[in-house]
Image (cartoon, rainbow, N blue to C red):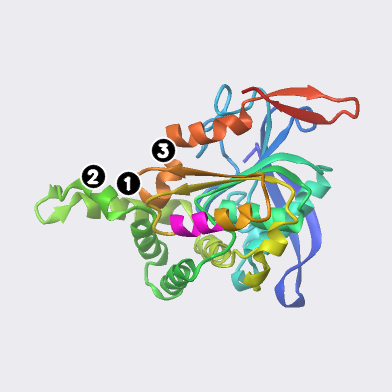
Amino acid sequence: MSDLKYIDIPNFNIENNKTIDIKLSYQTFGKPLYEAPIVLVNHALTGNSNVCGNNGWWSDLIGMNKCIDTNNYTVLAFNVPGNKYDVLEENNIENYKDFTARTIAEIFSEGLKALEIDKLFAVIGGSVGGGIAWELSALRPKLIENLIPVATDWKSTDWVIANCHIQDSILNNSKNPLFDARLHAMTLYRTPESFTFKFNRTEKEKGFYNVESWLSHHGNFMNKRFQLSAYKLMNQILRTIDITQGNETNFLKVASKIESNIHLITIKSDLLFKTEEHWDTYVQLKSVKQNVTMGEIKSIHGHDAFLIEYKQLIKLLRPIFDIKKTKNENNQFSHIRDW
């Protein structure tokens, strides 16, 4: 991991009045820090800080001459501590129940302070990464110019919590926890229509369907590239998204303080973060904020469409990132849309 850089965060407070030492790892891409507008990219459950370039999980979106153009932006990506991408044994987290999505946002905030970054042009993340983006915006309402949560919401609904509870049970009780949990998850990340389109009941061999082979492949791949403690932690983070910190009646009070332009992106067929919830969030936000937009990806592929439908995602994001950049006399960047 020669591309990784590290920030030491000693005596960080987590739940139950505990403190831990954190070594926060991150990567940067594109322009050097402080020479261009900064885009923070938050990874999803099985993702990491390698967001573009070779083996970058969002390289269709981010890179040279891509939608988020690394010729013009500094792209910054932290690893959620405990996701094991940094392979540091000291970052292994067993007490995952002591962490929430807000905890991770607080850690990222400390990382930004250590890097002396007090303004971000954009924060974008899909699924749990978008939930962490919401939490960061609530924690620091003046930090982000453009908040872009994709296929996620400001809270984990009862449906999300229920499925995370099932995942947690599998992870703690199965004889093959990573494999079994991933099989269950993949049926949530896609749709019945997506499965029919992809497989149409075809058989790999007599009595063994291609859909079964595909699911087993994902389960085996998870066993090879992920660790049990990391999956438990990321599932816990997904379960605990809530910018109101337990008081949903305060949503508009919290949201109205967020100064960001908020660009919500939903997926019409999403079975995990339902599009109806996103539209409800949009309507509520518009009652207190004018700088809110809503974009919808139309796809049969469900939650995973934010990793599949790149043309649609780019079309929705291009107006945000297609800008001219000029420095003002305070050596800060202003952003002028090129309509």
- Whichever of labels 3 and 2 marks the residue nearer the N terminus, that label is 2
- Report the side of 152 relative to 307 (left or right): right
How far is disc 1 from disc 2 in space, using C-alphas?
9 Å
Q: Secondary structure at mark 3?
A: loop
Foreground: disc 1 or disc 2: 1
Q: Position of residue 312 (x, y in %)?
A: 44, 35
In the depicted structure, whether residue 32 falls above or below residue 139: above
Mark 3: amino acid: Glu
Local SS, label 2: helix
Q: Amino acid at mark 1?
A: Ile
Q: Residue at 66% x, 73% y: name it.
A: 247
Q: Secondary structure at mark 1?
A: loop
Q: Residue furthest front?
A: 287
Amino acid beneath label 2:
Phe
Residue 300 has which mark? 1
Work out whether residue 270 or residue 203 is closer to the camera in this orientation and state it: 270
Q: Earlier in the sequence, mark 1 or mark 2?
A: 2
> Can you say whether 294 is above or below 326 in the image?
below
Which residue is nearer to you in this view: 5 or 67? 67
Q: Which residue is mark 3?
A: 309
Query: Label 2: how many residues lie within 10 Å, few (<14), some (14-19) or many (20+)?
Result: few
Give the residue at x 87% y 28%: 331
Q: Which residue is mark 2?
A: 197
Q: How far apart are labels 3 and 2 at the CA level?
A: 15 Å
Residue 278 is inside the magenta segment: yes
- Residue 309: where, in percent of width, then height? 41, 38
The stretch of residues the image draws in magenta is 275-281
Q: Position of residue 284 (x, y in %)?
A: 59, 58
Q: In the figure, 44 relative to 242: above or below?
A: above
Q: Position of residue 44 (x, y in %)?
A: 53, 51
